[in-house]
Amino acid sequence: MEAKPWDVLVVGAGITGLETANLLGEMGFDVLLVEKKPQLGGHAALYQCKALDGKCVECGACLVGDAQRKVLSNKKVVPMTGTTILNCQREGNLFKLELVREGVVSFASAKAVILCNGFRPFDPSTQKNLSYGKSNSILTALEVEDILRNNGKLLRPGSHEVPKSICFIQCVGSRNERNIYCSRVCCGYAIRIANLLKSLQPDLDITFFYMDIQTFSRSFVDDWAKIREKFTFIRQIPGELIPNKDGTISIYAKIDGVIKELFYDLVILSCGITPSEDLDQLAQIFKMKKNKDGFLSPSPENGVFALGTATGPKGIADCIAEVRCGLGGVVEYLEAWR
Amino acid sequence: MTSFQRVIVLGDPKLGKEVKDSLTNYGFDPTFVEIDLAEDGSKSLFKPLALKGGLGDFSLLMAGKTGYFEEKAAFVLICLSPVYGRDPQTLEARMSFEEFLDYNLEGIKEIAVLDPSNGKVLPSVWGPVMDKLLSMDLTKTKVSVVASQIKVAGDGLERKYRMLREQGVVFYKPDEASYVYEHGITIRFRDHILGKDIELKPELLVTLDQPIIPQHYKSLFEILRIEIDGHSYPQDDNVLRFPYYTNRKGVFVVSPLPEFLSKESIGQLISGICLEFKRLFHEMKNCSSKTTIEYNQSQCAYCLTCFRVCPHGAILFDSKPNFLPLACEECGICVANCPGEALKLVQLKYDELLYNIKESIQRGFTTAILACKRNYGAIAELIGNSFDPSRKRPYVFEIPCAGYVNENLLLRMAAMGGLEKITIVGCKEGNCRTSKGTLRGEMACGAVERLLNSLRIESPILAFFKLSSQDHIGLRELMGQV
């Protein structure tokens, strides 16, 4: 059975994919939105709103909910969850696609392909000095969000104690020899979580180990002085995290020329953005090149586009901005398509 | 209706020309209007007086030297160029970031690049600065960079930063640095990693100043009825950074701010705006001229309240209010604030809402939640609307916006009897296009609460709650409250 070809195949229904599909749908194009997970939203849907005292802090988490709703009510967009792409053949100007959903293979064709396959958070267990997994007191920022969602406040997993002093380690898995790039989002993300924790648990002491703080919102310019007073900032990345028997973590830091041992009840790792696990496979299927940092470099002349964190680290707002500006090329391609 | 291709380009001549050329390339028909809002009006070409109409049919009124002009277009584009804040005392002894990029640095032995804002310089400024430093012969010139934060959150910046360090550029990161001009330039600061005080005496000092929005743009935004945020950026959405959508549908802004966009990015931005034009064409074609607000002339006091409170610029007032269907977001704020009750929201009239609330009371619900359309889904999904006699469950009603709730509605709800609690759920402050809705709803709630308290009437407990679609903690708290 040969169905009518889709105008666009959008791969991945994270914030970029949702926004792309919705915008193209609104412009009258028929969009097939393929997502390998059973639900729409991707990584961005896992984030908690970080507003303080009812005031928005520009984290962008709510935009995912809005985008999900818009896509579900957009008649031009057909979402297919739990689906992966097996293969793709070029036939003239058409992409002939082989899709698989719950073991059943189906076929579709599209005029253009947009890869919005997103990212994978850096896996801290691959870096031994972080002792991740050896202690309940070392968590990733995403795990902290889970704890907050389930308990409404921060507790140490296992013992359920309320921590008194915690620290964030920035640039885990970015700005190092392996990944020579800044992940862009972690500074803002960590500081927003820290602000939220401080508002929930005002007597919590929070320290940041960092290299440079990256700008993360329009109000950063005003807020930075206040943030610096609220938390302790130590400009170095600890060499090693040492779990102690009482559950605390020891960190050695050089402060004003003197090396000191510091103790923390809980250590939160700000893990960076790395290329998504199926990036290689998709790059092969759609014959895309990778850039120096291992992300996709788009080849728009072939009708294969890439947007969002598939092309490099960026935040929710930047992903949407890229879609709004970058789709111009897609629309031109589709209008010229024969 | 004006031709869909007509666009008025307003503002800065340099950026405006660029924008005009690229719009022509994209197949539009732009008219450039150079404006000057300087107080003395010395070189004034055209002074904008008002922007009437809405998407697809704008009309810009201007005063020129020889009389009044009117320009019609489907869209309006404002080109906004930043200026750099500079300390006038030191103006001659140092160089700004823009001057530095074009300067021939041959023969200079020692340069210092300083961030005087203590860590606010954006990656989009560091990018060109690092490129310029990399283009220099760093074996002949000693370069020190003094900045509390080096922003590398941009394409390839971490690699450039690394190359500069390998080539001998020294980066100091003091929390604060000061500089003085006494017999040349001296920069002083404490390096906390080395644990010592440092003094630099460079031959040339480059300062990375913060771009600011000139005052006359603020007046322009006021004239055009465009809302600005705390930093004077004319954005309707505080999260999305690309500055092209304002609270008036069909009015866009092109500017290198707030991210200090490069030339290529501005090109992309214009392509994005053209895409938005196309999307809006589509919307205009499919939009039937439906009535969103019913108007009853006999109750109208011609007070212009609706015109003033509309956050979307969707009301055009001539002999009566006209509701532009394309721009109207059906938030109901005009209806809630009309003192004569001359307006009715077609989508959900107060009488209908009150009837539904009464029905829920008859079915045994004692708590009513009025949730704005952005929050209704999450709450309804969580509690459902089936009555469980063993547990007092709240009934949740969808309203277009928290700003649709006014004193009258709350008092009528309270007077019904049978309700123990009324909770209004709106968006977080600054998080919604209908930004004033939350504030207006909260004010109405507070006013009625105070009124009922002072009258000492037994009345339902009133609460206002701010929620967003991913606020799991907030949703737990709300459920705990009701």
Image: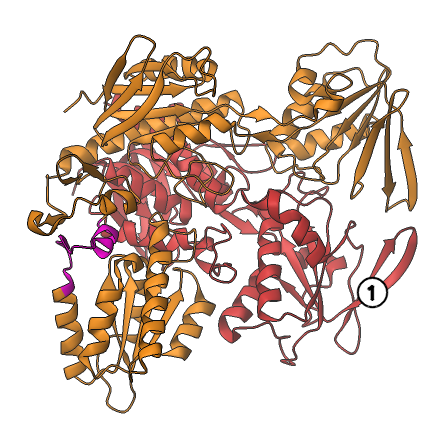
Chain colours: A red, B orange
Disc 1 target residue: A262
Above/below status of B281 relative to B100 = below
Q: Is residue B369 left or right of residue B10?
A: left
Q: Which percent across, then down, holds residue B40? A: 47, 17
Residue appearing at x 73%, y 71% in the figure: A265
Q: Quadrant of the N terminus of chain A?
A: top left
In this picture, is B79 found above or below B424?
above
Q: Amino acid at mark 1?
A: Leu
Q: Position of residue A153 (x, y in %)?
A: 56, 73
Is residue B8 visible to us here? Answer: yes
Q: How many marks?
A: 1
Quarter residue B378 falls in: bottom left
Residue at 66% over, 42% down: A179
Image quarter (top left, top right, bottom left or bottom right) of the C terminus of chain A: top left
Local secondary structure at mark 1 = strand
Side (left or right) of B386 relative to A36? left
Q: Nearer the viewer, residue A154 or B396?
A: B396
Question: Does B349 appear in magenta?
Answer: yes
Q: Chain of mark 1?
A: A
- Residue span colored magenta: B330-350
Q: Quick one: label 1, few (<14), some, or many (20+) residues within 10 Å?
A: few
